[in-house]
């Protein structure tokens, strides 16, 4: 099942809205901290621009780390596709 189908067919509207709000909020919070700006959005996709490639890289690293620490809706975390997956360095 594709992620879009998962969202529309499995999660309640309230949980979908909460998850999208968390995602969008993190994107925008980190833009300010990493000298970036939002050019456009479509659905959950963003077009972002940064002052330097280094700012973009640091934003991307902070964003990936930030996703791990968001308080995702429990209904999402209970799904196989939304469950946390932890890996240890090999």
Image: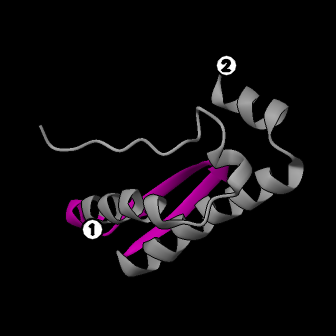
Give coordinates of residue 14: x percent, y percent: 86, 56
Q: To which quarter of the image does residue 64 belong? A: bottom left
Q: Which residue is drawn at 43% across and 65% down?
A: 66
Q: Residue at x 88, y 49 (%)?
A: 13
Give coordinates of residue 29: x percent, y percent: 51, 76
Left or right of 49 in this view: 25 = right
* Main SS of residues in magenta: strand
Q: In which quarter of the image is the N terminus?
A: top right
Q: What element carries label 2?
A: loop
Which residue is more in the foreground, 33 or 39? Answer: 33
Viewer-nearest of discs 1 and 2: 2
Residue 32's place in the image compared with 40, above or below, is below
Left or right of 28 in this view: 33 = left
Q: Residue furthest left?
A: 90
Give coordinates of residue 78: x percent, y percent: 66, 43
Q: Which residue is drawn at 28% across and 41% down?
A: 87
Q: Residue at x 83, y 30 (%)?
A: 9
- Is residue 5 highlighted in magenta? no
> Would you name the residue on which mark 2 appears?
1
Q: Is mark 1 on a helix, strand or loop?
A: helix
Q: To which quarter of the image does residue 21 belong? A: bottom right
- Is residue 47 highlighted in magenta? yes
The residue range painted magenta reads: 35-55
Distance between the Cα atoms at labels 1 and 2?
A: 35 Å
Identify the image's colour scheme: rainbow, by chain, secondary structure or one colour: one colour
> Any mark on residue 55, and which?
1
Number of labels in the image equals 2
Which residue is more in the foreground, 57 or 40? Answer: 57
| Residue 32 in view in this figure | yes
Of labels 1 and 2, earlier in sequence is 2
């Amino acid at each position: 099942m594709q992620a879009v189908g998962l969202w529309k067919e499995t999660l309640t509207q309230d949980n979908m809205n909460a998850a999208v709000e968390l995602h969008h909020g993190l994107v925008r919070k980190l833009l300010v901290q990493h000298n970036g700006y939002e050019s456009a959005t479509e659905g959950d996709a963003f077009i972002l621009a940064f002052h330097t490639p280094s700012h973009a890289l640091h934003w991307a690293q902070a964003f990936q780390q930030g996703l791990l620490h968001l308080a995702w809706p429990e209904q999402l975390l209970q799904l196989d596709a939304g469950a946390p997956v932890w890996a240890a360095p090999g």
